Image (cartoon, rainbow, N blue to C red):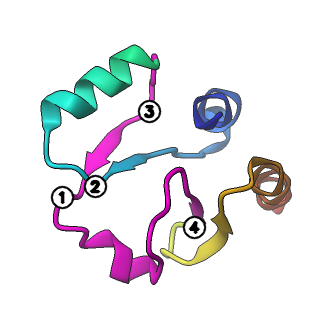
């Protein structure tokens, strides 16, 4: 579903980034190709990102982070994510 968000909203300055906590770049690349992901997937094998957002990641887990690195949504429910995303993108 994240792919659909990326394709639907990328012209509105939305950046979707995947985060892989594994350590195999080849596995990440294979996953991207298998699922036809067009957004970048970053690797974090040392899990340095988890403390930044103060969350233990459960996959899949979604964060909406604004340009100032403020988390505007966190959770795993795609309907709630979409609602918050539409709300944020409609703000001036």
Task: For marks 3 and 2, give the one nearer the viewer.
Answer: 2
**Label 4 vs label 3: CA separation?**
17 Å
Mark 1–mark 2 contact, CB under 8 Å? yes
First in sequence, mark 1 or 2: give its number.
2
- Asked if residue 41 lies in the magenta stretch, the reply is yes
Residue at mark 1: 45
Relative to the observer, which residue lies in front, 12 or 69? 69
Name above or below for residue 67 compared with residue 61: below
First in sequence, mark 2 or 4: give its number.
2
Relative to 80, 17 lies left or right: left
Residue 80 image position (x, y, % from top left): 82, 57
Where is the N terminus found, in terms of image quarters? top right
Write the residue at 27% across / 21% down. Answer: 30
Q: Does dot 1 land on a helix, a strand or a loop?
A: loop
Write the residue at 45% across / 84% down. Answer: 54
Name above or below for residue 87 compared with residue 24: below
Identify the magenta region: 36-65
**Label 4 vs label 1: CA separation?**
24 Å
First in sequence, mark 3 or 1: give its number.
3
Residue 63 image position (x, y, % from top left): 57, 62
Q: Does dot 3 land on a helix, a strand or a loop?
A: loop
Q: Which mark, residue 21?
A: 2
Residue at mark 3: 39
Residue at mark 4: 66
Q: Does dot 2 land on a helix, a strand or a loop?
A: loop
């Amino acid at each position: 579903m994240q792919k659909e968000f990326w394709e639907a909203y990328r012209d509105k300055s939305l950046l979707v980034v995947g985060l892989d906590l594994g350590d195999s770049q080849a596995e990440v690349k294979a996953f991207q190709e298998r699922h036809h992901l067009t957004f970048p997937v970053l690797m974090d094998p040392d899990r340095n990102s988890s403390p930044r957002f103060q969350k233990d990641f459960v996959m899949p887990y979604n964060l909406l982070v604004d340009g100032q690195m403020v988390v505007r949504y966190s959770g795993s429910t795609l309907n709630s994510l979409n609602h918050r995303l539409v709300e944020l993108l409609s703000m001036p």
